[in-house]
Image (cartoon, grey):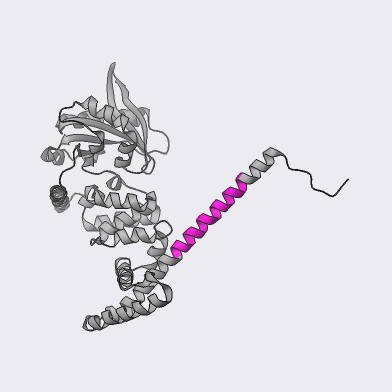
Amino acid sequence: MSGDLQPTSAPDVATLLADLRALIDEGRQQVAVAVNVGLTLLYWRVGQRIRTDLLQDEDRAAYGERIVATLSRQLTQVYGKGFTRSALNRMVQFAEAFPESQIVATLSQQLSWSHFVLLLPLTKPLQRDFYAEMCRLERWSVRTLGARIDSMLYERTALSKQPDALIQHELQTLRETDRVSPALVFRDPYFLDFLGLNDRYVERDVEDAIMRELEQFLLELGGGFSFIARQKRIPVGGDDYFLDLLFFHRGLRRLIAIELKLGDFKPADKGQMELYLRWLDKYERQPGEDAPLGLILCAGQNREAVELLELERSGIHVAEYLTALPAREVLERKLHEAVLSARARLGLHQDNGESAV
């Protein structure tokens, strides 16, 4: 018998090739992550050092700025345009916005330097932390992060309408456990401009359009949603009711029932949704899942009725949907008013000895 190796069979070669490609791809990904983490931490350290040595003392700020200009010229000569004066200023801003190096190290496992550059113009720390943590958790691309910021996602979440201390607690819990809460998931309003509806439509038109544009609708709902059923039959005492849309949220581990309404929210909508939720809880909820939640999407809101009924105590959220986007300044004003109203209501509840939901 000769000492030559026997030829490998074709299926083994195919398997070997697939395994080697997987190893190479995994190795490249690990190298890319390591390079990104290294560069991001380098930029943070450079910014932190300049900030500490030159810019913290207000009396020496002008002098520090001149030194930064000198440093940038010298560093650029050696290392290239990555260390221009504007780049160094951005690194200083980075260290100011994210003062804890451990948080930067954790975020940079998923966020690139380009992600951080988009976050730096956000002046509100809680707003910036929300986008950073959600970007990390849902692995948004730079483009997606930019779109989420432009759509004022944070301002539309239920989270933004809570007191700052509660927001900070929610974000800290998210950072430590990777578990989302309903306040992070639900938003108001929802943008459904992609449905292409004209000025006159009925509820079935909205539902049909959502099914045609299900991928876009899932993106607007947010990460973690999976579609289960349309017109889910709810048999109760010989009568049949039909839930418009049923989803499951992986992070919340809950069924999410969605009802579409053309007009403003009406008190009767609460009773209908409560019936659906209790039926789902009894007949559809699986072991390990939490109680189902309801989302009533309305063309308009009767905020006084929503507040009086305290719907969130029943696991029901009410939100407006917009089939055409308003001007940004109109949206900003509307969201600002909603935040003030919600926080005032929460403060009143706390003053009366009630816990905030």
- Identity of the residue drawn at 23% across and 81% down: 62
Q: Nearer the viewer, residue 300 or 212?
A: 212
Could you say which quadrant of the image residue 311 lies in? top left
Q: Position of residue 230 (x, y in %)?
A: 32, 27
Q: Is residue 130 left or right of residue 139?
A: left
Above or below, 79 against 145 in this view is below
Q: Position of residue 124 (x, y in %)?
A: 23, 61
- Identity of the residue drawn at 39% across and 68% down: 101
Q: Nearer the viewer, residue 182 or 291?
A: 182
Q: Is residue 303 left or right of residue 17?
A: left
For this orientation, the residue located farthest to the top is 238
Q: Nearer the viewer, residue 80 or 311?
A: 80
Q: Position of residue 242 (x, y in %)?
A: 28, 23
Above or below, 119 against 297 in this view is below
Q: Is residue 86 visible?
A: yes
Above or below, 51 against 121 in this view is below
Residue bounds of the magenta highlight: 18-37
Tell me which secondary structure the magenta stretch mostly adopts: helix
Q: Is residue 127 left or right of residue 24?
A: left
Q: Is residue 27 left or right of residue 266?
A: right
Looking at the figure, which quarter contains the N terminus? top right
Q: Residue 282 colored magenta?
A: no
**Number of numbered discs present?**
0
Q: Is residue 192 visible?
A: no
Q: Position of residue 38 (x, y in %)?
A: 45, 66
- Identity of the residue drawn at 24% across and 58% down: 165
Q: Residue 22 colored magenta?
A: yes
